[in-house]
Image: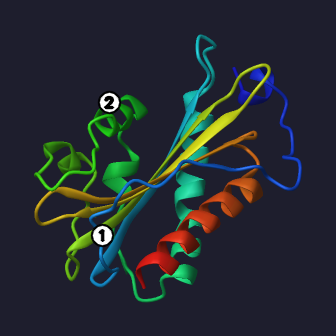
Amino acid sequence: MSLQIVDPFKVCKEPIEVYDKPDKPHLLTNLSDLSFSTAYTSIYTHHIKADSLEKDSIRFLYARNIKGLIKNTFPNIEMTNDSVLLRKNYFYIVKNSNALVLTKRPNKSIEKYKVKAYGSNKQLFININSFLGKMKFPTNVSINVFDIKNNVLLYNDYLQYDCDIRDYKALEKVISYGLLKLKENFE
């Protein structure tokens, strides 16, 4: 079953209302030595069986497109090979994301998100979760920065908006907002 059958595509209304959860104290102090792993998109359709190939095509397309946003915001960032991480199923990503907590202690769950980086000590990972339903389309964007040598979560920003995940322009605006927040606070 196609996602179009689950619910017809709807363009987001402008301006996009973003719920920006209050920031927790971050351990991040700067953005030097930063790499980018990926932007992982999970689309949940609850009890409706939707075509996983369609969800996967959105995941891979968005990951590729978001790389351009990252490069525009952080021109000197090290880009990594995200192909292995993108092929993980969303249960793997979600199960481990619940254990991501801002603490100075090492966290084994960060191992699940790291991608090999050659000149970086920190890694940016974006997790996008959307819930396609009949009435609402809540989409959550979590922007994380890890200390990849010590397995510590240094930064976590959580943004939410109600909009169809298939509207990439809306998602791009929300992610751009989150990336600019990160850049302005730590560069």
Figure check: 120 above or below 138: below
Image quarter hosting the C terminus:
bottom left
In percent of width and height, residue 42 lies at 52, 38
Q: Are marks 1 and 2 in contact (CB under 8 Å)?
A: no
| Residue 28: mark | 1
- Image-quadrant location for residue 179: bottom right
Counting residues from the N terminus, which is met first, the one under dot 1 or under dot 2?
A: 1
Quickly name the residue at label 2: 95
Secondary structure at badge 2 equals helix
Q: Residue lying farthest bottom?
A: 76
Mark 1, secondary structure of its residue: loop
Residue 14 lies in what quarter of the image?
Answer: bottom right
> Which residue is more in the foreground, 77 or 52?
77
Q: Nearer the viewer, residue 151 or 75?
A: 151
Residue 146 picture location, percent across and down: 27, 61
Q: In this rendering, is residue 153 above or below 43?
A: below
Which amino acid lies under the numbered mark 2 shown in the image of this protein? Lys
What residue lies at 30% left-to-right and 69% top-to-bottom? Answer: 28
How packed is label 1: few (under 14 Cα within 10 Å), some, or many (20 or more)? some
Residue under the image location 30 percent in, 76 percent down: 29
Give the CA separation, mark 1 to mark 2: 24 Å
Measuring from the top left, give residue 23's x and y in whole percent. 46, 55
* Residue 137 at x, y percent in the picture: 72, 32
